[in-house]
Image: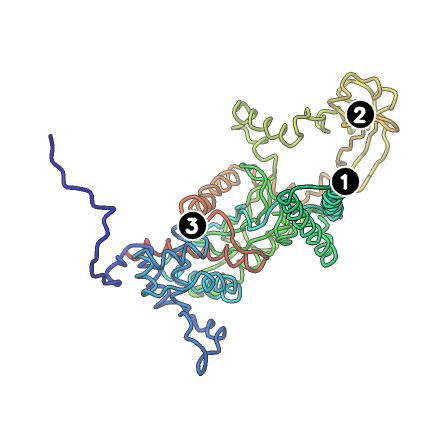
């Protein structure tokens, strides 16, 4: 039988350690230490402390920044795990210089980082630009949904929260009524009930305080939207793995080496509303970078998916100077390559059923037979419709509107495919854009023409390879897939710290 040397990996051993020798060239920690100690201006942190004459010595900001970024790079998101690593892990001891900050000091440092993260992020970008990692050929924007440090069970509109409060109060009242109706309950049962009542009263009081100190949020259509009691800035978001309470981490990156140029986290704001603030900040970042390099914005391509497509956004991007390619939600449907694709049609049908919660797809205007010359319209069942309006204005366009006869719609065999509810006062309505309005192309229509061209499809196809690997690296490879802070400013800083780890890793590859 073969004879092997014993495995002593579980054996404790006293050995002399030179901390400097543990940080090997070519590793992330080597790049991190070099950049923080030699390239970054950390003087802005001095204003945090007033202990030059009295008080205990503070932990150096350079050390705190290094161990936090190193922890994030290894998937250690919580301050407790980072503090424990500084006590037991040789690599963290080496990076920190054997300084072992308490987890509360680490948490406090991260919580205040929103005051200093912007200049640090810009300085790292400048180093990336000096190393020629930013190509300025194409930028891509997208969002990554991250779970926040808040429970979605504490979300709801003010009306829903009011009903939840009343329900908790009724449950608390029932405990008292049960005690009054049942004498001689055991001491253990009484203690359990009192604890439960205290918990219910505390939860009801939490809702009462929130409703009294906050204003109800409204969406873009003026309707109330859900607020979260624990973190009012967060929002409920639908992901491929279900619904989460969290934030949408928006990032714009360059296609040459996937360096992130701009990063912001948004909660109760739709993706469409994040484009303009992101582009404004991107332009500010470009102005701070190497001025010797050309930055003609009309030569830089800018891509985004259909989540950012709107008339307002496209008008803004048309004036921004970027060569923009933003898809609409029918982009794939118009692509000849997907015309006979069974996989595409199957996936689209799954999405339609998910959006409609299993209900069949209703007829759209494309299913109706409209003759613009004679101003006549027939429904999918073959019944004539009457014209109920002409030059009806909607979304800066003029439409001709038709309505089905009520007597026809009530007995129509296709009613369930045509109308959400059985008709009561009017039949099915449908509208078609006028020829005059069609000649005046909107920014959305112009973008459809542009992105359906061979060049447009080719440029847009590069978007996935530009931005998606960035989110894969941050959330999967590095394990930075959730947020530990609360509030827009603090969460935004933590998201930028995640992106900072990604950019430093790009610099690591240039330091071999």
Q: What residue appears at the point 64 percent right and 32 percent down from the top-left corner?
A: 355
Please name the colour scheme applied to the rendered image.
Answer: rainbow
The reply to whether discs 3 and 2 touch (Cβ–Cβ < 8 Å) is no
* Residue situated in front as seen by the camera: 361 or 403: 361
Question: In the rendered view, does 264 fall on the left or right side of 91?
Answer: right
Quarter holding the N terminus is top left
The nearer-to-camera label among 3 and 2 is: 3
Q: Position of residue 415 (x, y in %)?
A: 78, 21
Q: Is residue 111 above or below residue 379?
A: below
Label 1 sits on residue: 181
Residue 258: numbered disc: 3
**Cα separation between marks 3 and 2:** 52 Å
What secondary structure is marked by label 3? loop
Q: Count of labels shown?
A: 3
What secondary structure is marked by label 1? helix
Label 2 sits on residue: 377
């Amino acid at each position: 039988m073969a004879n092997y040397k014993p495995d002593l990996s579980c054996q404790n051993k006293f050995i002399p350690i030179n901390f400097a020798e543990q940080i090997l060239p070519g590793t992330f920690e080597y790049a991190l230490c070099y950049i923080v100690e030699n390239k970054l201006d950390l003087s802005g942190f001095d204003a945090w402390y007033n202990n030059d004459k009295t008080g205990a010595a503070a932990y150096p900001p350079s050390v705190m920044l290094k161990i936090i970024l190193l922890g994030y790079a290894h998937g250690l998101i919580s301050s407790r795990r980072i503090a424990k690593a500084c006590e037991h892990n040789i690599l963290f001891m080496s990076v920190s210089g054997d300084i072992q900050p308490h987890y509360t000091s680490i948490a406090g440092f991260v919580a205040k980082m929103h005051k200093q993260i912007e200049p640090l992020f810009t300085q790292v970008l400048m180093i990336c630009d000096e190393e020629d990692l930013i190509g300025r050929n194409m930028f891509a924007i997208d969002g990554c949904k991250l779970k926040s440090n808040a429970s979605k069970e504490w979300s709801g509109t003010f009306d829903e929260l009011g009903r939840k409060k009343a329900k908790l109060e009724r449950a608390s009242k029932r405990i008292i009524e049960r005690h009054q109706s049942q004498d001689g309950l055991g001491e253990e049962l009484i203690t359990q009930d009192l604890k439960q009542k205290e918990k219910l009263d505390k939860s009801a009081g939490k809702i009462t305080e929130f409703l009294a100190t906050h204003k109800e949020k409204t969406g873009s259509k003026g309707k109330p939207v859900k607020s979260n009691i624990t973190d009012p800035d967060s929002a409920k978001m639908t992901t491929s793995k279900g619904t989460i309470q969290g934030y949408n981490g928006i990032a714009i990156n360059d296609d040459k080496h996937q360096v992130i140029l701009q990063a912001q986290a948004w909660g109760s704001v739709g993706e469409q509303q994040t484009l303009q603030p992101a582009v404004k900040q991107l332009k500010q970042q470009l102005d701070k970078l190497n001025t010797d390099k050309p930055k003609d914005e009309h030569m830089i391509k800018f891509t985004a998916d259909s989540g950012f497509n709107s008339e307002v956004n496209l008008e803004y991007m048309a004036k921004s100077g970027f060569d923009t390619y933003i898809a609409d939600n029918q982009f794939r449907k118009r692509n000849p390559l997907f015309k006979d694709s069974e996989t595409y049609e199957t996936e689209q049908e799954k999405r339609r059923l998910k959006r409609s919660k299993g209900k069949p797809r209703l007829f759209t205007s494309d299913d109706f037979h409209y003759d613009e010359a004679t101003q006549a319209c027939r429904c999918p069942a073959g019944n004539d419709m009457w014209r109920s309006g002409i030059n009806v204005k909607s979304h800066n366009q003029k439409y001709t509107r038709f309505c089905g006869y009520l007597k026809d719609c009530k007995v129509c065999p296709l009613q369930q495919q045509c109308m959400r509810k059985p008709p009561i006062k009017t039949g099915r309505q449908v509208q078609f854009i006028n020829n005059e309005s069609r000649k005046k192309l909107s920014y959305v229509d112009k973008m459809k023409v542009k992105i359906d061209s061979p060049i447009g499809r080719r440029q847009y196809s590069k978007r996935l390879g530009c931005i998606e690997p960035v989110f894969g690296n941050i959330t999967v490879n590095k394990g930075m897939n959730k947020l530990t802070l609360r509030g827009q400013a603090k969460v935004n800083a933590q998201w930028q710290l995640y992106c900072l780890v990604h950019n430093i890793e790009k610099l690591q590859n240039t330091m071999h």
